[in-house]
Image: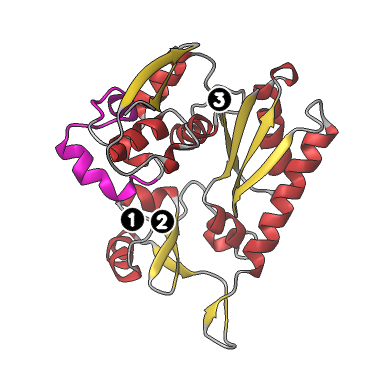
Amino acid sequence: MAVIHIDVDRFFLAVHAQFDRSVREGPGTPPIALFQYNDVICVSASARALGVRKHMSPEAARAVLTPAGGRLVHAFWRDWPGPRTWYKPYQDASRDLFACIRASLDAGAACGSTLERASIDEGYVSVEERHGPESVAEELVRSVRERLGLPVCCGVAPNKLLAKLASSAAKASGGGSGASGRVYAVRSDEEAQALLRQTAAHRLPGLGSRADALARAGIECVLTLSTADVANATGLRYVRLSWGDADAAHVAEEHTKTRKNTTGGWVCFEENSSA
């Protein structure tokens, strides 16, 4: 069984661009950041290159964008009972996205595959190896682009976390393994280690705010984290997360010892029941 993580590139901007052509990304287009209230929620590639980031304040983003000829764009909003952000266009696009994914799966050789919605613009598909997961991912990329005009990337891997990291790698580099350059597949332990080596440790779920602490500890990438000495339950949870252990969140907060087992080349840590 393989897992495909499918994720829309810059979802909110992509949806907004379907109603406002001036925010469509392309050669020569100005850098753009989409915001709501006091929070930047989506950033174009050219704006990101300038240093604009999600969750930056609009004022800080404007200070970077304006000198470069860029601009801030407010998310859809309405006056009553507001002004407040109007989420219906994004919710409609999300519904269409998952309907398109389901239809594409059912129309092909992956009929009956499990589809799990992870957020408004991303999901997981569990596919049996006999269906050819990479081919299924390529078809999802093509069908979503053709039917909805939304750009998506896919990661294919043995578990959810590696699949998510793989789709992020495809999105960041544009150098995925598929013919479209939008699919990144992890087929072996060596490819998994290469992906973990190129992924910053703070990109793991729950570690976004720990970037400085990880840097002080000399932990730069996920692969470094996965081989680090585990001194406490919190560290154990992070190691488990780095290898895609879905039960990592349930680790006890203290007095946890570990033992290391290797099964099929995949490293996992388990609680020592004799502790």
Residue plotted at (36% across, 18% down): 260
The stretch drawn in magenta includes residue 210: yes
* Mark 1 crowdedness (10 Å alpha carbons): few <14, some 14-19, many ≥20: many
Residue 31 shows which numbered tag? 2
| Residue found at the far right of this picture | 107
**Pair 3/2: label in front:** 3
> Looking at the picture, which amino acid does disc 2 mark?
Pro
Secondary structure of residue under mark 3 = strand
Judge by depth and name the residue closer to the eye, 172 or 69: 172
Q: Are marks 2 and 1 in contact (CB under 8 Å)?
A: yes
- Could you tell which of marks 1 and 3 lies nearer the N-terminus? 1
Q: Disc 1 designates what residue?
A: 52
> Looking at the picture, which amino acid does disc 1 mark?
Val
Where is the C terminus found, in terms of image quarters?
top left
Judge by depth and name the residue closer to the eye, 226 or 87: 226
Residue 224 x/y as whole percent = 28, 25
Q: Disc 3 designates what residue?
A: 157
> Looking at the picture, which amino acid does disc 3 mark?
Ala
| Residue found at the far left of this picture | 216
How far apart are labels 1 and 3 at the CA level? 31 Å
- Could you tell which of marks 3 and 2 lies nearer the N-terminus? 2
The span shown in magenta is: 206-230
Q: In the rendered image, which quarter is residue 222 located in?
A: top left
How far apart are labels 3 and 2 at the CA level? 33 Å
Residue plotted at (69% across, 23% down): 135
Residue 266 versus residue 235 in the image, above or below: above
Where is the N terminus found, in terms of image quarters?
top right
